Amino acid sequence: MGISVEVDPATVRPVHLDLVTLIVADYDAAIDFFTNVLGFELAVDTPSLTNDGRPKRWVEVRPPGGATGLLLAQADGERQRAAVGEQMAGRVGFFLRVDDFDEAHQRMRAAGVQFVGDVRHEPYGSVVVFVDCEGNRWDLLGPRP
């Protein structure tokens, strides 16, 4: 059962995807990985509350100059703990495009990032799969030729 609505592109105002939630085991370990290994910026780290009033943190990291960021959400409960590292069921679910592929690849290797397979050169750019601090798979993508 789907919804079909005709949209006139001329009347739609520009939008962008602001945040994508990434469930993590530990806020500080995830912040360390995304800022010190991938070079993201810590945009927000503030106390917050769960829907039922328990303390948590609201943590956003963003690639430098990026419009879309990650909301790092510490797992709360068994169901969420089971999803850490498995949000995409083993598929690549995140794509990090960099201007200097070789520099980023070497820097990440030196930092101990786990890569899966070899670098490939595709029509859309150089690519290699890496695993983040929680076990999620990402594509590291170089510039398009």
Image (cartoon, grey):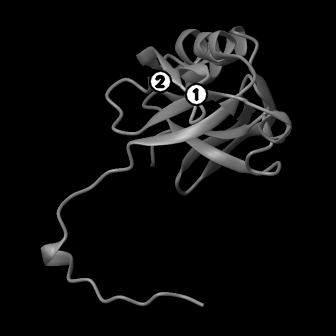
> Is residue 73 toward the left or the right of residue 75 in the image?
left
Using the image, determine if residue 41 lies above or below residue 75.
above
Q: Residues within 10 Å of mark 2 (few under 14, many from 20)?
A: many
* Residue in view at x 78 percent, y 34 percent: 84
- Please identify, in this view, whether the residue under mark 1 or under mark 2 is nearer the observer: 1
Front residue of 120/20: it is 20
For the residues labelled 1 and 2, the Cα–Cα distance comes to 8 Å
* Residue in view at x 73 percent, y 29 percent: 75
Label 1: which secondary element:
strand
Q: Earlier in the sequence, mark 1 or mark 2?
A: 2
> Is residue 9 toward the left or the right of residue 133 in the image?
left
What's the amino acid at mark 2? Answer: Val
Q: Are marks 1 and 2 in contact (CB under 8 Å)?
A: yes
Q: Residues within 10 Å of mark 1 (few under 14, many from 20)?
A: many
What's the amino acid at mark 1? Answer: Leu
Reading the image, the residue beneath label 1 is 72
Q: In terms of image quadrants, where is residue 133? A: top right
Instruction: Report the label total.
Output: 2
Front residue of 62/116: it is 62
Reading the image, the residue beneath label 2 is 61
Label 2: which secondary element:
strand
